Image (tube, helix red, strand yellow):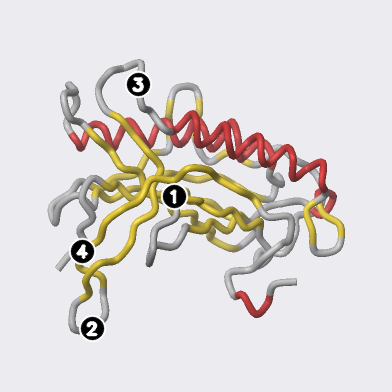
Amino acid sequence: MPYVVPGIVRYTINGRLGSRDVANVLDYRIDTTGGTSSRADSAFNMAGILINEWSAEVLINLSSAYSFTSVSWVDLDSASGSTGVRTTSGAISLPTAGSLTGDPLPGNVSQLVTKATASQRGRRSGRLFLAGLTEADTSGNNILAARLTVWETRWAAFLGDTNQETPSIGTYQSFLAVSHVLTRDVNGDPLTGESTDVDSLAPAALLATQRRRLRG
């Protein structure tokens, strides 16, 4: 049975760093209540917003060795939710490379960004591992303080611009969220879940990998 999380559309920011495929998963709670757009159309439109904002706030601070290739999605709201992929939005056509010159960090070294949520017992905040930083932005195992400040500003703008509490187009609302598994099948695969909205995106100074034992 497909994994179902009410209201959630799961987006994947697809890219490449050198010869490696890289992906960042972002869950958005999409609410079409009282709107004029279907869930499928809203999911499609939200993918365009993510192309615009990932390009404006994230890609601009990544190495030119990183290439942003597409945004894909699956609507987890029901077992028959829509799926799709977008490579264009407005004036932006993918793939598009990062803006910074200089040597990139190795593909297994990332910036750790915490998707902070309101504290709830048994509910953990989410994490995002962003590859493609340049060596010039780091010292030792840390992001330089000045660059970390830039990233804090960029992530705040990304969250604010992709969350649509009062969207100008008036068709749907969107909120970055973290999904939590509630039930699993006999094989341990997730069946049902629920979500918690993200309050902030907080980049860590210490560089990380997806395997905690390799941090530092």
Secondary structure of the residue carrying tag 3 is loop
Is tag 3's residue or tag 4's residue first in the polypeptide sequence?
A: 3
Q: Secondary structure at mark 1?
A: loop
Above-or-below relation of 184 to 66: below
**Residue linked to disc 4:** 192
Q: Residues within 10 Å of mark 4 (few under 14, many from 20)?
A: many
Q: Residue 166: which numbered mark, if any?
A: 3
Amino acid type assigned to the residue bearing label 2 in the image: Asn
Alpha carbon distance from label 3 to label 1: 21 Å
Q: Are marks 1 and 2 in contact (CB under 8 Å)?
A: no
Q: Nearer the viewer, residue 162 or 43?
A: 162
Residue 112 image-quadrant placement: bottom right
Measure the C-alpha gap from mark 1 to mark 4.
21 Å
Q: Where is the N terminus found, in terms of image quarters? A: bottom left
Judging depth in this view, the residue of 73 and 28 nearest the camera is: 28
Disc 3 residue type (three-letter): Thr
In the rendered image, which residue does mark 2 sit on? 187
Q: CA distance from mark 2 to mark 4?
A: 14 Å
Q: Earlier in the sequence, mark 1 or mark 4?
A: 1
